[in-house]
Amino acid sequence: MRLRVALLVSFGVMLVVPAGAAAAFHLTSIREVFPGDTARPTSQYVELQMYAAGQNQVGTHSVTVYNGLGTANSTATFPGPVANGQNQRSILIASPDFAGAFGITPDLEITAPMMDRSGGAVCFDSIDCVSWGSFAGFAGPAPSPVGASAVAIPDGSSLERSIAPGCETLLEAGDDGNDSATDFAAAPPSPRNNSTASTETECDTTVTGAKLSAKSTQRPSPKKPKIVAKATLGEDGGVSVVAKAKLRKQTYKLKKSVSLSAGKQAKVTLKAAGKAKKKIGKALKRGKKVKAKVVATFTDEAGNTAKETAKVTLK
């Protein structure tokens, strides 16, 4: 019985370890490729970027450069992990002349010949590939889909992955559409090695400090019925306030929108008009109570929204 238990535990460990190892490098995309230019023809680089933490275990994994006919020109294999594995960190693979031209030390050196501006492709293992210009397709099985090729790379430019889909300030899995023409565009060279801190940031997805307050009992003039509320937002934005006042089976809406400055309270006065003014004013004049639900919709400058509610009684 003891032997059987030991065997089961060992087998369980064997199942877990490969999954953990696979998770240590594959959440990485090609972020930028630079094929050199007229001024720096032999200073070329490929930049990888992680989109999750802990993806720095790249040892034994490779970056391969292909010519326009789909034949491998050069391959560089990482001898071990890179030092920094924070989410959004880059890894830089470059030609021998790169450091002298850009003043940045690459994390891995790849020998020339490398990229041709007019057409070619780059792959990181079978994880991610990009192609451009007159690339005719891989001579063998495609390591990873490239879709339609991006533009031929203009002199002086790199080819950079867009991170606009989803959060436009953060590299994410969804930024890889497996179509080079859609995912990449020409841009000024901006190489970053693994020791360079990333500049990408999480998107703002929440509204900060949204507050609505209103006295539960308010005594407006029957001639000018209104509801008074106060709104605060922890950032610049605006608020749209709607009060639904009920009289018997009828509901009357009072609306008001105002701009809000960060941390400053704004008075929001919702004045009844038209039929609502007449009906609510008549009820108040007769001494009847009018109950209303106030709903404030806050919107910040990033387009995020939040709602707050309050209940009031007019008498």
Image (tube, rainbow, N blue to C red):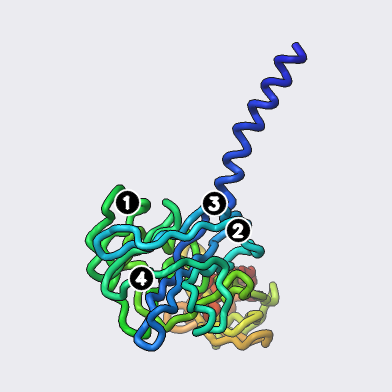
Q: Disc 3 vs disc 1: which is toward the camera? A: 3
Q: Eyeballing the image, is 2 above or below 227?
A: above
Whole-angstrom CA distance, mark 1 to mark 2, is: 24 Å
Q: Is residue 191 visible?
A: yes
The residue at which mark 3 appears reads as 60
Q: CA distance from mark 4 to mark 2?
A: 25 Å
- Residue 221 visible from this viewpoint: no
Residue type beneath disc 1: Ala
Of 247 and 45, the residue lying toward us: 45
The location of residue 286, given as percent across then percent down, is: 58, 76
Q: Is residue 255 above or below residue 124?
A: below
Label 4 or label 2, whichever comes before in sequence order:
2
Q: Secondary structure at mark 3?
A: loop
Q: Which residue is mark 4?
A: 115
Query: Decide: marks 2, 3 in contact (CB < 8 A)?
Result: no
Residue 37: image quadrant is bottom left
The residue wearing badge 1 is 142
Q: Give the amino acid at mark 2.
A: Asn
Percent of width and height locating residue 10: 68, 26
Q: Earlier in the sequence, mark 3 or mark 1?
A: 3
* Residue 178 position by quadrant: bottom left
Label 2 crowd (10 A; few <14 / some 14-19 / many >=20)? many
Task: In the rendered structure, find residue 56 and report the number of the disc placed on it.
Answer: 2
- Report helix, strand or loop for mark 4: loop
Q: How dense is the environment of label 3, judged by Cα within 10 Å: few (below 14), some, or many (20 and up)?
A: few
Residue at position x 43%, y 75% from top? 44
User: Upstream in the sequence, badge 3 or badge 4?
Assistant: 3
Q: Is residue 301 left or right of residue 230?
A: left
Q: Quadrant of the N terminus?
A: top right
Residue at 61% across, 68% down: 309
